[in-house]
Amino acid sequence: MRGRGCCVGFRAIQKLRSKAGSLAGVGTTWWDAAAASTSTSARTTKDASYSSDTSFAEDKSRKLQQPAATHRSFLSLSELSSAKANLSFRKSRKNGFGLETAAASFARRASSSALEDSVSEVDIENLIGEEKNCITERIRHIVQTELPSLARVAEYFFQPGVEGKRVRSSALLLVASSLAPDGPEPAMYTTDLRPYNHFPREVRRKQQRIAEITEMIHVASLLHDDVLDDAETRRGLDTVNKMFGDKVAILAGDFLLARASVALAALKNTEVVGLIATCIENLATGEMMQSRCSQEERLSLDYYYRKTFLKTASLIANSCKSVALLGEHDDEVAQLAYDYGYHLGMSFQLIDDVLDFVGSSSSLGKPTLSDLKSGIATAPVLFASEEEPQLVDLTLRKFKYDGDVDMASSLVANTDGIKRTVEVASHHSRLAMKAVENFPPAQTKHAESCREAMRFLARSIINRQM
């Protein structure tokens, strides 16, 4: 039975990859270039547009179009939900959804399609790669400590070649440049080796600090997550917990959070400190939501979207807002930066959950179907359960029996679960682009190039390699 289940699971993966490939183009994108090299040389990027834009995505994602005010530590369920589980999109909507008229739906789709089609390919690494590498080099510098063993573990995922795609720092640097009155000064392309608790007076250095802090917080959360999930691989390497043990991994994560917090305090901006501190709180809250939830919550898309915001989108959204505030922009512009980060983060995680089904271990840097193996039902499963009720039972028992993971993968392959998840992610991508369109007029050609890169980054997330 075990062998047969594995065979079924393999066929299901192949089928899922085939479906996903028809939804989003597969090729060499900025995403691949950013992962392959940390150099500053220009790379030619390929991208395939995602053209499927049905009224389903518009209707199911209506609640996600307006991010909540950012002074709150999390969003309400009604604000985060793009759909109610077990509610067909063909039925009448409650809670203010309302069905669009055919004309309004067509106009909305035409507008979204035009916006997406207008996005040009951009070599993001050519724009910000050198500055991004300086940030990574500074992180390696500021995590050094009198205990070499602690420093070695803390910089484990900041080693050359294994820093990951650094989409967060990419987004932040692009936001900073897109709103700036001029391009970065040449000095900003050199690594700042001043102490981590040093107060930088230069606006660009302050914004770079946010990129550094965000990357450290992100990696700290990965170290903690790998312990909780008993993971063995990350970014193609053995995890810290596998190499050095759980206690060392937890302490390394705590150390990164501590260094990030001191660097944050050194900025001497109480609003920014509050925003980033809230992100750390949200990470812990989201992880607790994932590990401790009721049966009803386990099946709820509302709950999934809220958890996704807390664990992923919050850090990107609030960091983008912080960069705008440190650039001395007004609240309206800061909110637009937040909106961009919010939708980028939501889209990123939705596609990440798709790739857990249709990606390869080599491209992901970790095993596929890891969420199912950890007992977690993500968007593809939740959408698929509306068509395959058997998935409900599998979800409630956390896919814990032999054959459950393979069966769930096969059932998802036979539904529109992947397609519907990509549709919602694509909708978020378009809303991220729309936030950029609403920025005040660009003051330089460099700023306009960075805005085009922001739009391209939002679209590239959808086209990550399947």
Image (tube, rainbow, N blue to C red):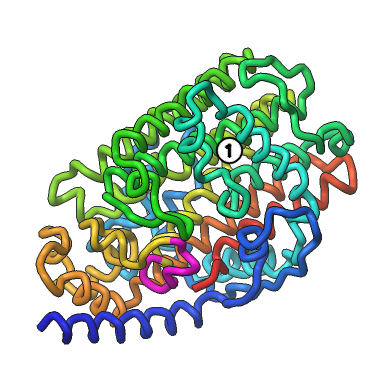
> Is residue 444 magenta-colored?
no
Residue 58, position as x, y percentages in the image: 48, 62
Question: On screen, 285 above or below 383?
Answer: above
Q: Tell me if I can see residue 245 in this picture.
A: yes
Locate residue 271: give its quadrant.
Answer: top right
Q: Magenta stretch mostly in which secondary structure?
A: helix
Residue 96, position as x, y percentages in the image: 37, 49
Q: Nearer the viewer, residue 337 or 44?
A: 44
Question: On screen, 460 above or below 69?
Answer: below
Q: How many neighbours does mark 1 have within 10 angstroms: few (below 14), some (14-19), or many (20 or more)?
A: many
Q: Amino acid at mark 1?
A: Tyr
Residue 173, position as x, y percentages in the image: 70, 41
For label 1, the residue is 338
Look at 14% across and 45% down and name the residue there.
294
- How many marks are shown on the rendered structure? 1
Look at 35% across and 76% down and name the residue there.
416
Look at 42% across and 30% down and name the residue there.
280
Residues in magenta, as a range: 356-365
Q: Nearer the viewer, residue 436 or 355?
A: 355
